Amino acid sequence: MTTLTKLQPAPVIDETARLLTEHYVFPETAKQLADLIQQRLAEGAYDVGSAEELARLVTADLQSVNDDKHLRLRYHADPVSPEQGAATLESIRLDFDTSLGGAPRVELLGGGVAVVELAPMLFPLDWAAEPLSAALTLASRARALIVDLRDNRGGDPDTVAFVCSYLLDERTHLNTMYWRSGERSEQSWSLPHVPGARFGGSRPLYVLSSDRTFSAAEELAYDLQQLGRAVVVGERTRGGAHPCKGWTVHPHLEATVPTGRAINPVSGTNWEGTGVQPDVPCAAAESLDRAHALALARVAG
């Protein structure tokens, strides 16, 4: 890994190519992309003056083969730690501290319908368990619940399972992650017990989505939709189903490389590239009112 502060594209590209080859979940695509960025380097395509511009160019090339939106070279304005994943953690800690732990809104609407907004992401569970438990427990007495994911950009799959546990009655298989060409897999299940009170699996549940909803937030919407537990209202989501890890390849640049792929036990597939398709399509700005109306009709019936 290069520690040079002056932008030199060759070490950045060499290290990014190595990370692709060693870690990307699709080995054949990894080789294709590693060759591509090395070729582009040789052609002078990355001879630019700023790390931000290099990140933009390399990301476009990395996503040009299979449009994997988790595969990217991320620019950080402030220098980041060389430790694996540190750049990501540093960039999200402030978001956690300024969003009430990822649950910035809990509100009771008319007719006993509650809204819990989860944003801007589903933070690591060891951070988020307490604030999420508080928010979901507070909403557990509502007649119907709306979970707002319109501004959620993703996060921790363990946190997805934690949230689902409040919205189901019993332990349920949610997802399976296959790592590096299926060499090993890891199942995700909702929890048999949760701190606080569950909303449970029988009362009306709606999930709001937008074209900004991404990654683990998409998994939350998709898992609940596939189980028949929730009605998704809003826009088609961005379509990123591959969990990834981050490596610092320059003081201002982080390579994020997907190391696995998600397979839903109900659908046998995932939302990669397609996004989560809403059950009730509408503009994201209208989705809360639409879901509220649907919930009122359900509880009145």
Image: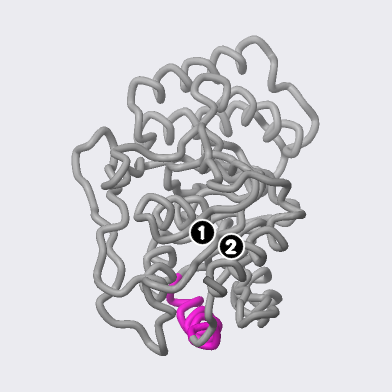
Q: Residue at x 66, y 64 (%)?
A: 293
Mark 2, Cα crowd under 10 Å, few <14 / some 14-19 / many 20+, is many
Q: Is residue 103 above or below residue 149?
A: below
Residue where numbered disc 1 is placed = 155
Q: Residue at x 61, y 57 (%)?
A: 208
Position of residue 269 measured from the top left corner of the image (x, y, whole percent): 34, 37
Q: Is residue 111 above or below residue 150?
A: below
Can residue 65 be seen in the rendering of this structure? yes
Q: Residue furthest right?
A: 49
Q: Amino acid at mark 1?
A: Gly
Chain-order first, disc 1 or disc 2: 2
Which region is colored magenta? Answer: 125-140
Position of residue 13 measured from the top left corner of the image (x, y, whole percent): 56, 28
Q: Which of the 4 image quadrants contains residue 191?
A: bottom left
Q: Residue furthest left?
A: 183
Q: Residue at x 51, y 28 (%)?
A: 14
107, 244: nearer the viewer: 107
145, 50: nearer the viewer: 145
Q: Amino acid at mark 2?
A: Met
* Left-right relation of 301 to 260: right
* Left-right relation of 22 to 299: left
Position of residue 152 measured from the top left corner of the image (x, y, whole percent): 61, 58
Q: Which label number is shown at residue 121?
A: 2
